[in-house]
Each structure stands twice: as C-alpha cells, then as structure tokens.
C-alpha cells in the first residue's frame, strides 16, 4: 500500500477517480460506523497519523487527498517550479536539493501539509500558499523580496521557531504596513529572528514598541540588518538590558545621522561596560576597537556571518 500511496501522490490526481498503480480501490467494510471513519479521514491529528492511515488504506487518501512534505522551496533555475522534499532540511541541503521533487505550481492538484521548512522569494508563490496548503506546521520560514498580507504570514508562522525576513512587505488587508512589534508578537514560538531591510524598512517607524512584547520567553537570537534610525534607541537599550541572555546583533543603515550615531556610541559604551556576552551593534564609521570588543563576545556560530557582513 505504501508504494501505491506514493505513486498516487507523485503522479497527481485525475479529475475524478484516483488512478492507482497496482489496482483500483475497493469498498471497505469497517468494524466502526462509517461516520467515525469519515471523521478520522477528514480530521487527522498529525501529519504522521495521516501518513500511517493513508499508507494502510487507500480510502483515507481518496477521502482527503494531500501530500505531506518536509520542505517547500523555490527552484533557482525556474521559479515557476517548486521543490518538494521529504527529507529534513539539513539533509536536503547536504544533498544540494538533488533529493527534491520538482513540480510546476500551476499543475499541483493536491494540497500540501508542510512540516518543516518553507522558503519563498517570488511573488508567484503567494496565491499558491493561500490556496494549496492544507496545513503549514513549519518551524523554519524564510521570505525574501515579496509582498504578503498579515493573515497569510500568520498562517505560515504559527509553529515557526526560526524566521528570516529579507526586504519583505507585510501588510494588513487595508494595505497598511504591519509594524515590527506586531510581526514579532505574532510569532509565539520564536527562537531565532533575522530581518534585513535593503529597500523597504517601513515596518520600523516611530510607533514601533519592542518593549511591549510578551511572547519572547523562547527567544535565543536576533539578527537585524540595515536598521533605520526610526528605531528608538532608548527602547533598544531597555530591550537589550531586559534580554541579557539573548544574542542581539544589529547593523544600522549607512544613512543614519550623526546625532543618532552619538546615541548609538553611548549605547555601545553601556554594552561594553556591562561585559554581557552576545550583544553587538555596528554602523559605518564607528570605533573599530569597540567593534572588536563586541565581536569577541559573540557566539562562535555568528562570527563568520559578522565577517561576511
């Protein structure tokens, strides 16, 4: 049965009856009421549970046909195609994505239950995310250079622990930009957050208030690039003092004013004097000696990233 299930999933679904490789499906006679079996098929508790049911009997896949994948990523060579993979993301990365299944998004008839990683860097993926995902339980999400509405973002990040957002525009349904504090607030399981603002930093403004955040008990690392001076330094200072155990690495935009640089210098002095590990602030033209002191107190995992930046 397992091979038949995978064949049906891999070959997609015909309009009408699902075609199985070995034989057609047969009517099942259950020791339970059919309404109970139907409810089980339509409401699987976990991806693992559904996979076991579908591999044991074709009925469950026919009643609720979708494919469980660990990873969804874009195809670097042709972004009209997606790469679907059953392997863990680190194993997939080691294999240079040669283990992935390449599929045209427009031809995808099954919905997907994604369990680990989603990487999106093309606007064409947004309607696909909205219409083709049965459940999104990813722990790792990366979005790059796209526009999306807040409801779709929250749907993708409900279970996310590691979130990377580079130059993405996240808006409410009324087209207003979602501020940074509201985005972080929507990530209840957050452990690692990386944000980069190369072209659009509108989610950080004078109303951004990172001190009100209450859901950061699991937070381990914050990595910000190209931050504008609209981020209140007084709030940032209080945030750093509040989260002493969190690795906080911030690169500021090169266009920040001299007055803002002076405020940053005062904050950098506080960080150095506190001797707390893992806090790093950088801007163009700052004191190199102080920069090296902060760098020496970083975790080894981040030093390569720092040097690259």
Image (tube, rainbow, N blue to C red):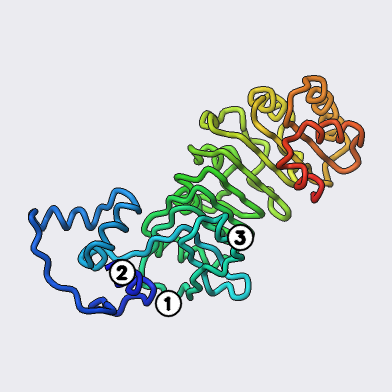
- At x 34%, y 53%, the residue is 48
Q: Mark 3: which secondary structure?
A: helix
Residue 187 vs residue 51: left or right? right
- State yes or no: discs 2 and 1 in contact (Cβ < 8 Å): no
Q: Nearer the viewer, residue 269 or 8?
A: 8
Going from N to C along the chain, the mark reached first, 2 or 3, is 2
Q: Nearer the viewer, residue 273 or 211?
A: 273
Q: Which residue is mark 3?
A: 94
Going from N to C along the chain, the mark reached first, 3 or 1, is 3
Q: Position of residue 31 (x, y in %)?
A: 7, 55
Mark 2 → mark 3, Cα distance in angstroms:
27 Å
Q: Position of residue 8 (x, y in %)?
A: 32, 73
Quarter of the image that includes the N terminus? bottom left
Which numbered dot is residue 198? Answer: none
Which numbered dot is residue 5? Answer: 2
Q: Residues within 10 Å of mark 3 (few under 14, many from 20)?
A: few
- State yes or no: discs 2 and 3 in contact (Cβ < 8 Å): no
Residue 2 vs residue 272: left or right? left
Going from N to C along the chain, the mark reached first, 2 or 1, is 2
Q: Nearer the viewer, residue 198 or 55?
A: 55
Q: Which residue is mark 1?
A: 107
- At x 52%, y 65%, the residue is 125
- At x 78%, y 35%, the residue is 281
| Residue lying furthest top | 274
Q: Mark 1: which secondary structure?
A: helix
Q: Position of residue 303 (x, y in %)?
A: 77, 42
């Amino acid at each position: 049965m397992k091979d038949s299930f995978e064949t049906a999933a891999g070959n997609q679904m015909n309009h009408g009856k699902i075609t199985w490789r070995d034989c057609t499906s047969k009517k099942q006679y259950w020791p339970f009421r059919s309404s109970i079996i139907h409810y089980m098929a339509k409401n699987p508790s976990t991806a693992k549970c559904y996979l076991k049911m579908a591999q044991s009997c074709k009925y469950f896949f026919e009643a609720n046909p979708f494919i469980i994948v660990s990873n969804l990523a874009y195809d670097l060579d042709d972004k009209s195609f997606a790469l679907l993979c059953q392997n863990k993301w680190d194993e997939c990365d080691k294999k240079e994505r040669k283990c992935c299944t390449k599929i045209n998004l427009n031809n995808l008839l099954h919905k997907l239950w994604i369990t680990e990683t989603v990487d999106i860097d093309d606007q064409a993926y947004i309607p696909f995310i909205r219409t083709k995902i049965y459940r999104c339980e990813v722990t790792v999400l990366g979005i790059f250079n796209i526009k999306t509405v807040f409801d779709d973002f929250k749907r993708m990040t409900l279970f996310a622990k590691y979130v990377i957002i580079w130059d993405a525009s996240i808006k409410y349904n009324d087209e207003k930009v979602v501020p940074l504090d509201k985005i972080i607030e929507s990530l209840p399981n957050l452990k690692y957050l990386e944000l980069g603002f190369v072209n659009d930093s509108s989610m950080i403004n004078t109303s951004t208030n990172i001190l009100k955040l209450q859901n950061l008990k699991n937070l381990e690392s914050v990595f910000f690039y190209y931050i504008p001076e609209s981020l209140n330094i007084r709030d940032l200072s209080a945030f750093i003092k509040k989260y002493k155990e969190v690795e906080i690495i911030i690169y500021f935009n090169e266009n920040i004013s001299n007055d803002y640089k002076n405020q940053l210098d005062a904050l950098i002095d506080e960080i150095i004097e506190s001797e707390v590990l893992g806090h790093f602030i950088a801007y163009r033209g700052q004191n190199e000696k102080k920069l090296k002191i902060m760098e020496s107190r970083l975790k080894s995992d981040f030093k390569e990233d720092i040097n690259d930046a």
